[in-house]
Amino acid sequence: MGFVNRQQNLDTNFDNAAMLHILKKLDYTYCGEVYLAAGERKAFEKLI
């Protein structure tokens, strides 16, 4: 069986302090900004 790359990706608003705190606590890695029609968001990922 080969290597399987498992990851979780998500994004959140810049001003969502509660979610940013949870992501930090759960060791998600900040990846950069995502540009959507509704505006910019912060992108995160976690390898599992």
Image (cartoon, rainbow, N blue to C red):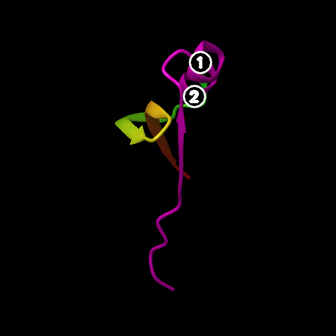
Residue 10: name its quadrant: top right
7 over 22 or under it: above or below: below
Element type at marker 2?
Answer: helix
**Residue 12 image point, x, y percent:** 55, 31
Q: Give the class, few, some or many, for how many residues have Cα within 10 Å of label 2's Cα (few <14, many ≥20).
A: some
Which residue shows up at 49% across the image and 72% down it?
4
Q: Which residue is mark 1?
A: 16
The amino acid on which the numbered mark 1 sits, given as a three-letter code, is Asn
Residue 26: name its quadrant: top right
The amino acid on which the numbered mark 2 sits, given as a three-letter code, is Leu
**Residue 46 image point, x, y percent:** 51, 44
| Magenta-colored stretch includes residue 15 | yes
Q: Nearer the viewer, residue 30 or 34?
A: 34
**Residue 9 image point, x, y percent:** 52, 48
Q: Give the class, few, some or many, for how many residues have Cα within 10 Å of label 1's Cα (few <14, many ≥20).
A: few
31 over 22 or under it: above or below: below
